Amino acid sequence: MKIKDPVNRVDIQAKLNGSVKYIEDMIFENLHYARTLRSSIPRGKILSVAYPDIIEGITIVDKNDIIDKNEVSMIDTDMPIFADSEVNYVGEPIALIVGKDKNQVIEFFNKIIVEYEPLEAVLTMGDNATFSKRTYTKGDLSKYSTLEEFSGHYKTTYQEQLYMEKQGVVANYVDKRIEIYGSMQCPYYIKNALINALGFNENRIRVIQTTTGGAFGGKEDYPSLMACQTALASIKIGAPVRLIFDRREDIIFTTKRHPSETNITSYLENGKIKGMKIDVELDAGPYLGLSDVVLQRAILSMTGAYQIENLEVNGVVYKTNNVFNGAFRGFGAPQSLFALEQHMTQIAKHLGKDPLDLRREYFVQTGQLTSTNGIFHENIYLAKMADKLEEISDYKNLKKESDDGNLVGYGFAIVPHGGGFTGDGEAVHIKAVVKLKKDTEGFVHILVSNVEMGQGALTALAKIVASALDIPLDRVVYKNTDTHAVPDSGPTAASRTTMVIGKLLYEAAVKLREVMDVNEEIIITEHYKQPDYIEWDQDTLQGNAYLSYSWAALLARVEVDPLTLEVSCTDIYGIYDVGIPVDEKLLLGQVHGGVIQGMGYGMMEAMYSDGGKIQQNSFASYAVPTTVDVPNIHSDWIINEYEDGPFGAKAAGELTLVGVAPAIASAVADAIGKDIYEIPVLPEKILEVTK
Amino acid sequence: MRNITFTLNGEKVTVETTLSRRLLDVIRIDLGLTGTKEGCGEGECGACQVYLDGKIVNSCLVPMSNVIGREVQTIEGFAKTKAYEKIEKAYIEEGAVQCGFCTPGMVMATNALLKDNAHPNSKEIKESLAGNICRCTGYQTIFKAVKKIADEEEK
């Protein structure tokens, strides 16, 4: 086949007829159920845990069952598997209650009484403990400090991934080996966390990804915690142990998008932005997790699609006793781009300029210096994309009226998303290895640790390999990941699967092509190599912050009911540059899904913490977009071959989300004639700014 | 505990359970039909939808006392019908599936819609699928698939 041939998803039939097995559908002999005993306070000392009289068949697994280290190893090892003597957030796991009879487990669980000595909890960002602070500068901002200042303070709250399949793992200790099955993005993160926690030789640890019902970043680091807990439980009782959250548990206690506050001050001279000073704050919760990496993407995305010559950007991750936050599609960029795009909209209004015209003045261009003094080496067609956006939206003739008296508004967002890990992360930390195996029957097996989680990886990567070899798609075999079968090609994250892993597989396929006719098993191994033109200094954050950028130019149309102040988004127009799409149907799937998830972030998905506890706990109280909420999506893309991507492809998954909330917020501001500083733009927030 | 008899996918079955047990659990655990999913357990997401005497219900909200002597069809049963084949074809062609967890429920809801209204307009499609949450697709390809089936009926 050829890359231009349209294909159907390879996993679609089994999903349609319900025959595919997710972790909750799998049968294990002698399966035991686990329920998590959690802290009910944000911070305190555990004085006692009073368990009811032990019933036969019930096992308690807690800190006393630690085999080697009470650590969930991620970037740091600060998070315990089970709380030791202190708890640091509402919902922190203290123990697992395990038993074969689920009802018995729940009955026992309900009688447990934990006594605490509460300690003062840190529930807001401020002068308190921090996990990391990062800064970079460009040009010389001090030269412009006497100019007119234009400032805004922007706020975002939590967003919950709300993958449809809840978090779930099964641990099974057999023959002195631990096997983990589960819904996950990063099998090797789990494997490494288990090596650290158990002290086992790596051959004794096997992680098998089961069909994953959505993840969006929520299953990047969190499953490592669950795997460590259930592994200890399975080793203790000698039977498989299953931990699957119920929905409320999953919503309240698992990682979310970081709440943020961003301050931007622009320095203006003769209607031009001469420089910006930007301060970003993120609330990590009590443990580091991925938060420092999220912060880096937040600050490195901070100037978006715009060339700002003089810059000072500071970022801080605060340590609090709120819920532990982590990865979510966009990974820090949605917060930054919301702030930046509102700011650009507000400057345009301040200067009396059209919001798109103002943005055009600052579009970055090929060959220019990035905000971190790297060089934009790829072709950038932002002006062309803006033209195309005007064309498909008929921008010049847009009407500000609606038929039913609603207030109508339009808002732009022109945004980048850097593909792959930040800086030299791919080369220094991830060091991906991929393998292609041709068997004696001529089937080609893709051996990578990147998973299908709904985004279409099984299809996209198989299509790349089949096209590179010019063989039918069904000659390529790519299964759910098993760490005993595949090398570590890194996590399924950072929109890197198609762009980085796809390229390595393409390279492997090109080599395999030469030996396809040899009648024996052949394995081709490829190692990641950083392109020569990438330079990065992690200490100073100088150089190419990303391998390449994908771009989106968006226009949102909203209507605001003048009485109820309810917002409906009627249309999203989007032009995308993802290089050359590997598959148009898969790309559209990402576009649609990203737009709607971004819309939820911008105007619906309100999630707040009170006293350290998340207040929204169900589909009823945490409203994500349903069919009746969705706008018309008008999308198109430009073709812009990326030389270091497979068949010219760049990243797509996160790009489709990051600009949507800002575009909608600007559209609401346009409709009501007042600036917006906070998302989601709920009626009560609009009331605050309009009264 | 008592014996409860009902029809499942055209066959009579008897299970020993309690009257208050959820139909969802009996289908998935006792009878091993795992195509029906639990997304929320509160009747909010539609992933567990099945037909009860031909009407679509959230099986997480149906106690077994309401199932005695009645007819239940799950995705496994529905997948053997002609109506399913049309839905499958349209969903595949439009690429209306991503993670797949909402999909069996969405398929059941699609059929429930088309059975009552062979030619729904956009508003009717949106309203009748509003009880099925999908976090991946943004619903666009699902709408297209439904439209496609309706259009082909017309031919």
Image (spheres, rainbow, N blue to C red):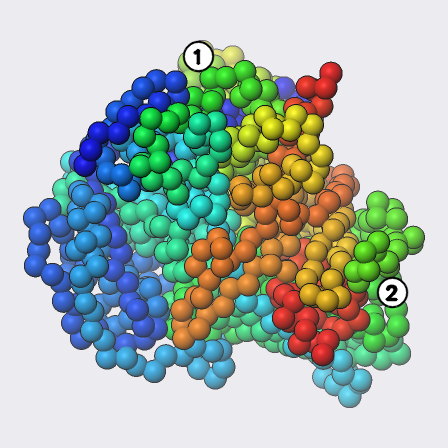
Image coords of residue B119 (percent x, y): 69, 27
Q: Which residue is mark 1?
A: A441
Measuring 73% from the left and 67% from the top, which residue is drawn there?
A: A563
Distance between the alpha carbons at the discs numbered 2 and 1: 62 Å
User: Mark 2 — on which chain does it sit?
Assistant: A
**Residue A263 higher or lower than A331, as above or below:** below
Image coords of residue A140 (percent x, y): 72, 78
Q: Are marks 2 and 1 on the same chain?
A: yes
User: Mark 1 — on which chain does it sit?
Assistant: A
Q: Looking at the image, is mark 2 or mark 1 earlier in the sequence?
A: 2
Measuring 43% from the left and 30% from the top, which residue is drawn there?
A: B52
Mark sitting on residue A466: none
User: Picture quarter containing residue A8?
Assistant: top right
Badge 1: few (under 14), some or many (20 or more) residues near its Cα, within 10 Å? few
- In the rendered image, the residue lying farthest to the bottom is A146
Q: Quadrant of the N terminus of chain A?
A: top right
Mark sitting on residue A354: 2
Local secondary structure at mark 2: loop
Badge 2: few (under 14), some or many (20 or more) residues near its Cα, within 10 Å? few
Q: Foreground residue, B11 or A270?
A: B11
Image coords of residue A691 (percent x, y): 72, 79
